Amino acid sequence: MRGLSHIAELEAESIHIIREVAAEFQKPVMLYSIGKDSQVMLHLARKAFHPAPLPFPLLHVDTTWKFREMISFRDSYVKQMGHQLIVHTNHKAVADGINPFDTTSQKYTWAMKTQALLEVLAERGFDAAMGGARRDEERSRAKERVFSFRDKNGVWDPKNQRPELWSLYNARVDRGENMRVFPLSNWTELDVWNYVLTEKLPVVPLYFAAERPVVVRDGNLIMVDDERMRLKAGEKPVTKRVRFRTLGCYPLSGAIESSAKNVREIIEEMQASRASERQGRMIDHDEDASMELKKREGYF
Amino acid sequence: MELLRLAVVGSVDDGKSTLIGRLLFETGSLFEDQIAAVKKASKQNGCDLDFSLFTDGLKAEREQAITIDVAYRYFGTDKRRFIIVDTPGHVQYTRNMATGASRADAAVVLIDARYGLQQQTRRHAYLLRLLGIDRLAVAINKMDLVGFERARFESIKRDFEAFVAPLKFARVDFFPISASGGDNVCATSANTPWSETGTILQYLERVAPGSGSEGAPLRFPVQTVLRPHLDYRGFAGQLVAGSVKPGDEVLVLPAGRKAKVKAVDTYEGEVGRAVAPQSVTVRLTEEVDVSRGDVLVSVSEPATVARELEANLVWLSDAPLELAKPYLVKQGTRTTPAKVTALHGRVDLESLSEVPANSLSANDIGRVSVECSRPLVVDVYTRVRSTGAFIVIDPLSNATVAAGMVTRAAKTSGDVGAVTADERFTRLGHRGAVVRARDAAAATRLERRLFEAGIVAAVVATVEIASAFEKAGVVAVVVDSAAKELDVESLLTSLR
């Protein structure tokens, strides 16, 4: 009997993983997507190196379509914590007119997220990128290693992954190749929220219920976050009490009607709810196995 | 609440995915949109709810209706949180099964009631034992297809018991189930009134995680040195065995220098004591040279410093083992160039006996000698899992080509030195310990019980004598009126 709580054991495992990345790679980076999982991962990284500063920078791949509140939260939080943050956007795709309204969601994700990420990893020579993805999120994620190898084109080959035994991670990559590392692999959505609660971590207020202007589109509640939102004929924004379970690009993120105004209420609501968190993510529903296809192309 | 890592294994089509899907479904761990998606897919295959679809994640798997890669699933009850490792049954994926089982605390082995023991069942049971799992739940599945016939169940049970006897599992439990019908998975079945073992879920909630490192001495492999300013020098790592507190004397290996622990730091501040598997930062009072790859260990029960190892190797790569080829060995936080100098034999998975071999191919298991360029700080795998395990990497392809488990470690130098705890362990087959019994009669009974289980044990008068016995590798029984009730089975497990 080990005597540690399951959260304490998950925390210890994640800290071990983050330290292995810092020790084994030449130039690692930590993806910071501003969501709750990123908050937890970043907090674990601080714990891993305390009292020393983080030995790697943070990276945010900005599609330019994130919620305004996410960007202001990012800027104030990272500044307050004194971390180094790199923000990267695929400006060529923006100039080419790629946007979430005219472009299919597959193409939009590929250009603004996958391509943008591959671009900045190559440009800056990062050989490892840590992300806050969890295995409980989606079926193909459930099969991904903690250290997930990507070839020169950033491609994930799910049928040919490196065997991963014990806590012995093979961190070797050649020039141009890189590793995606998932320190939160074994956490569940509930674990993340419980940790946010007990560690008193700040999160973007969009997670909490408030009156927000939304339109109903294809069964999703889409928030009208700025003047760029294109309304279809007959669509009229209405004010509803909503919150978000996952955060991304606002035209592609579905809200849920909720009255949960703090973390404790979110946890209560989640325990009563029967819908998975990715339900509101429109990009995952393009086609069957869509996450697997995106990941094969280099998506996180 | 504690965490239990569980491997679920079995032959192809024994119903692993269905059992896991059933556990997730009945513990309320699935979401409505997930259930709706699976219902839709099930209809296409002509059934109401195909539980196996909850876990088969990759496209190729859904096309072929088999499990290719290890998948991880999460669920919990009010007693425990579980991480399930769903491992593939096909022969060619034995390496993935080893991956899945390497960190498991317990395992469920599935057997199809219609077909009984299969070759894959034998391999998996063998592999689980090799990887250090010492208790099994055997789920005899598809009982509905044999009319829930008790005789059928008992006959498979007898076959399995006869087969696993030489593998020396600490405990094996048997369950008659139907994963698709839900019998004895989460609810006791009315179809098996003769069964006394309850449900799989009840078992999972109470089984002791027998990973073999309980009660093991301090092992703290240093991952990185934290040096934010000149007045702070901390060694960051995860305790893989034992505990550490300020004031403890520790040994820094492989250098062999003693040092005293000044503080055990966490983000929240200094702590009075840290235990495995916590991640902490240790500061020492002396200025000792310590870097990544070094290990802080218990002074009284140190690990072995060795360049030459004997090990069981599970070959994972499609490129076969080549003797004398330069490989890399990663063990703990240390990576060193190494060569496999001898292959003593391969395990024939039909008979589970060792046969002569010239090489190992993917999914083979062999007994080898390994010579490392730099000394490693190791334990015998059955004693401390984390310091007895290593992986072999091909430095050209960077592939992980093998997984190794140390069976014997030879000391580095010609200097014979003091007898190590590992050497005693190898000689006696168990480690030393001090155990407490409530009164003299209980002590005598315990001594007899241990003796008959092959343990060198003796009742002694004082705690001082007991700790000297422990150091000598012997189990000392002392009388202590405050002693708690002892689970002899767990004790036996922890000693081996």
Image (cartoon, coloured by chain):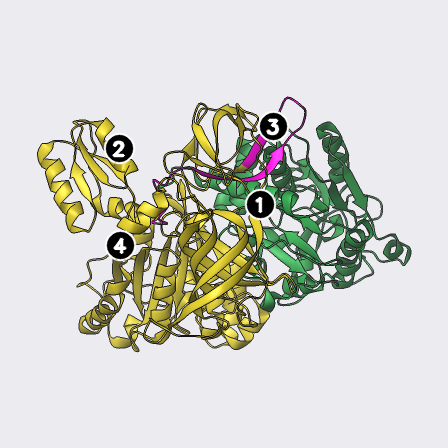
Chain colours: A green, B yellow
- Residues A198 and A211: in front is A198
Which callout, 2 or 4, points to the residue nearer the camera? Answer: 2
Indicate whether residue B229 is drawn in magenta.
Answer: yes
Which callout, 1 or 3, points to the residue nearer the camera? Answer: 3
Secondary structure found at label 3: loop
The residue depicted at 90 percent of the width and 59 percent of the height is A96
Question: Chain for mark 2?
Answer: B
**In the rendered view, does A235 fall on the left or right side of A194?**
right
Which callout, 1 or 2, points to the residue nearer the camera? Answer: 2
The residue depicted at 36 percent of the width and 58 percent of the height is B107
- Amino acid at pointer 2: Ala
Give the Cα distance between marks 2 and 4: 28 Å
Q: Which quadrant would the N terminus of chain A be assigned to in this image? A: top left
Specify the segment rendered in magenta: B210-236
- Amino acid at pointer 4: Ala
Which callout, 4 or 3, points to the residue nearer the camera? Answer: 3
Question: Chain for mark 4?
Answer: B
Question: Chain for mark 1?
Answer: A
Asked whether the residues under marks 2 and 3 belong to the same chain, the reply is yes
Give the mark nearest the N terminus, 4 or 3.
4
**In the rendered view, does B234 fall on the left or right side of B487?**
right
Which callout, 2 or 3, points to the residue nearer the camera? Answer: 2
Give the Cα distance between marks 4 and 3: 43 Å
Give the Cα distance between marks 1 and 4: 32 Å
Mark number displayed over residue B170: 4
Indicate whether residue B435 is drawn in magenta.
Answer: no
Residue denoted by label 1: A17
Q: Number of marks in the image? A: 4
Q: Position of residue B353 (x, y in %)?
A: 32, 71
